[in-house]
């Protein structure tokens, strides 16, 4: 009689369904740093994920990518964005806070693209090192907003950190102080 086998298979199938459902549900729940993400399809707003080419308002406090930023950085960013807007420049965030698994996926992708970990590390830090994961960095766009911020950022304490990333800013000085010279790239710091 094949009956018990069928029942076992059916039980196994429903176990798989239940785990799939649990996976789907868990993507809606904090904390963000869940199991490793295999692809960007596994990431959501709870990881601070912003799809390539998209950006969010620096005032989107309901999104983890903005809400999980260091409070001083967020306040400086929002003050700068208001003054940039007064100058006719719209400032947007292309990357803010990121979960560890999002950062790891970016690093894995970069290693694949650059075919070398050494080269990839010039652009993407590990989850342990990344200031994005600690909520201490924002990537700004579009280009005219980057230019505005490299010119006026120090009024808010915001400085471009890396010479090869004109979009990446961190709170690095007291408002009004001069920004330190940027490091060559992310592997230098
Ligand atoms: Zn960055």
Image (cartoon, rainbow, N blue to C red):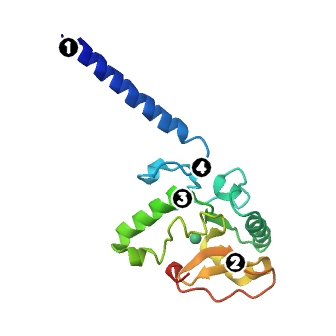
Q: Which mark is residue 2?
A: 1
Q: Nearer the viewer, mark 2 or mark 3?
A: 3
The answer to whether the residue labelled 4 contacts the one labelled 3, judged by CB atoms less than 8 Å apart, is no
Ligand 1 placement by image quarter: bottom right
Q: Mark 4 packing: few (<14 Cα in 10 Å), some, or many (20+)?
A: some
Residue at 61% in and 45% down: 30
SS at circle 1: loop
Q: Nearer the viewer, mark 1 or mark 2?
A: 1
Using the rendered view, name the quadrant where residue 155 is placed.
bottom right
Separation (CA) of disc 4 from disc 3? 11 Å
Separation (CA) of disc 1 from disc 4? 45 Å
Residue at 30% in and 16% down: 7
The reply, left or right, for residue 111 in relation to residue 76 is: left
The answer to whether the residue labelled 1 contacts the one labelled 3, judged by CB atoms less than 8 Å apart, is no
SS at circle 4: helix
The answer to whether the residue labelled 2 contacts the one labelled 3, judged by CB atoms less than 8 Å apart, is no
Relative depth, front residue between 147 and 107: 107
**Residue indicated by mark 3:** 100
Q: Earlier in the sequence, mark 2 or mark 3?
A: 3
The answer to whether the residue labelled 1 contacts the one labelled 2, judged by CB atoms less than 8 Å apart, is no
Q: Earlier in the sequence, mark 1 or mark 4?
A: 1
Using the rendered view, name the quadrant where residue 177 is placed.
bottom right
Q: Nearer the viewer, mark 1 or mark 4?
A: 1
SS at circle 3: helix
Q: Which mark is residue 46?
A: 4
Residue at 57% in and 86% down: 183
Separation (CA) of disc 2 from disc 3? 27 Å
Residue at 71% in and 79% down: 172
**Residue indicated by mark 2:** 149
SS at circle 2: helix
Q: Position of residue 161 (x, y in %)?
A: 62, 80
């Amino acid at each position: 009689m094949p009956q018990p086998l069928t029942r076992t298979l059916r039980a196994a199938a429903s176990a798989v369904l239940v785990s799939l459902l649990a996976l789907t549900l868990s993507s809606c729940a904090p904390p963000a740093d869940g199991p490793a993400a295999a692809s960007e399809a596994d990431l959501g707003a709870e990881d601070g994920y912003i799809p390539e080419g998209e950006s969010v308002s620096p005032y989107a406090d309901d999104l983890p990518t903005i809400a999980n930023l260091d409070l001083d950085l967020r306040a400086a960013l929002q003050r700068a964005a208001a003054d940039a807007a007064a100058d006719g420049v719209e400032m947007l965030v292309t990357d803010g806070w990121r979960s560890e698994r999002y950062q790891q996926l970016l690093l894995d992708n970069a290693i694949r693209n650059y075919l070398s970990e050494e080269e990839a590390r010039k652009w993407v830090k590990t989850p342990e090192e990344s200031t994005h994961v600690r909520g201490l960095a924002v990537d700004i766009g579009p280009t005219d907003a980057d230019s505005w911020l490299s010119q006026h950022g120090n009024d808010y304490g915001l400085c471009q950190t890396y010479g090869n990333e004109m979009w990446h800013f961190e709170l690095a000085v007291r408002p009004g102080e001069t920004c330190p010279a940027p490091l060559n790239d992310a592997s230098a710091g």
